[in-house]
Amino acid sequence: MAQHIPKENGLDNSINVLREGYMYIPNRRHSFHSDIFETRILGQKSICMGGKEAAALFYDNEKFKRHGAAPKRVQKTLFGEKGVQTLDGEQHRHRKEMFMSLMTRERLDVLKQIAEKQWDIAINNWEKESQVTLYEASKELMVRIACEWAGVPIWAKELKQRAQDLGALIESASAIGPQYWAGKQARNRTEKWLSGLITQVRNNELFPPEGSALYTMSWHRDLNGNLMTTPIAAVELVNILRPIVAISVYINFTALALHQFPQEVEKLKEKDDDYGRMFVQEVRRYYPFFPFTPARVKNDFTWKGYHFKKETLTLLDLYGTNHDPEIWDNPAVFHPKRFVEWKGSPFDFIPQGGGDYFSGHRCAGEWVTIQMMQVALDFMVNKMDYEIPQQDTSFSMVKMPSTSRSGFVIKGVKKI
């Protein structure tokens, strides 16, 4: 029997999204007593939904598509135009295989070795500083790690600019005004830089390691056997570098979790890798990363009596699903051991999206994120000492993505 989707009043509720940020969809799921509701965002009818069953529906490639889902302003900053996030069907599967080819055990082992080396170098430098703003410093650190792993050459003199630009792609996606325009300019500079490197590779003037991201993006061929155009190859190379730099957000929250929940430190010092992994997963669940993700209805269909009309914009509640009391016991409590019994469902724990890595739109870099957070955690707990001066460590539930307001300042850094 057909059911009416609960509907939010108002000609357009985009301003409410900006005002409420991560809590926009969870607040209405609570007030409507429903995991699905209808609203209007950016001048168009939109369906918002959350929870495990909604996530399973959302990642059904027969029901939803990504082409035309992300607003142009987001493509011009966060995603880039004509990248893997905007593709569907065989095109998406083929392009996604390219990304997954970079995520082999061997390549991830190389990444871990690079990360440990670069963390060691960073701590040596931080020891000389009176204080360090961890969020800003970790962006530069992650750029060094990402570029070395991807085979992208970078000069010391350009490091700060590249870190600022790659960070701006993440920070400007939901911004308006000057910050948004700064994000667009950062996107243009970054793509121009990487396009130049790809051209050098194709002209046999630059020789990145085979299997690296720069090599792979430069020589990848589409379903018709053609090389990707240089601009699209640059977009996809950004889609390797940018998510690794975005891990600086999680590094910030990892440090904050150690500060907010000091009882966890002794458990982590026992060097129990399983507990460290659970701690990292709980950081990803507990703290805000991205609030929701978009898709469009592929063709008319009915689910649980609710009618979905072709081309309707649909938003899946990532943050709310990770805090859903129907899924998680006491979701407002930081409790790493909840992951002892977690069964690894692709639809209930979705900080970086859900579904299948190979055929779906789940983030190809999720394994990278977990590994880089574990390396960061090991260094912060076992390989460095630091003091935390008085500061505002609170974080916004409106700014997207969020970090601690102070950027998490540390001082007196010493290597152990």
Image: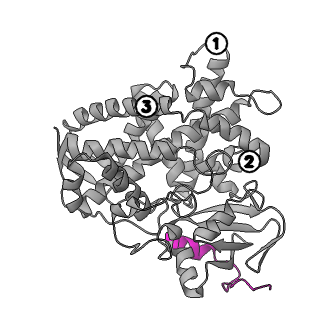
Indicate left or right for 392 with 39 as reference.
left
Residue 254 in view of the camera: yes
Q: Is residue 6 magenta?
A: yes
Residue 364 occupies quadrant: top right
131 w.r.t. 404: above or below: above
Residue behind mark 1 = 204
Specify which label sits upstream in the sequence, 1 or 2: 2
User: In front here: 336 or 88?
Assistant: 336
Indicate left or right for 145 with 188 as reference.
left
Q: Nearer the viewer, mark 3 or mark 1?
A: 3
**Residue that lies at the very extreme toward the top in this rendered image:** 204
Specify which label sits upstream in the sequence, 3 or 1: 3
User: In front here: 17 or 52?
Assistant: 52
Q: Nearer the viewer, mark 1 or mark 2?
A: 2
Secondary structure beneath label 2: loop
CA gap, disc 2 to disc 3?
Answer: 29 Å
Q: Please name the residue shown 65% across and 55% down the image.
A: 73
Secondary structure beneath label 1: loop
Callouts 1 and 2 close, C-beta under 8 Å: no
CA gap, disc 3 to disc 1?
Answer: 28 Å
Mark sitting on residue 87: 2
151 w.r.t. 207: above or below: below
Q: Please name the residue shown 67% across and 15% down the image.
A: 203
Residue behind mark 3 = 109
Q: Is residue 57 magenta?
A: no
Question: What's the residue type where badge 2 is placed?
Answer: Leu
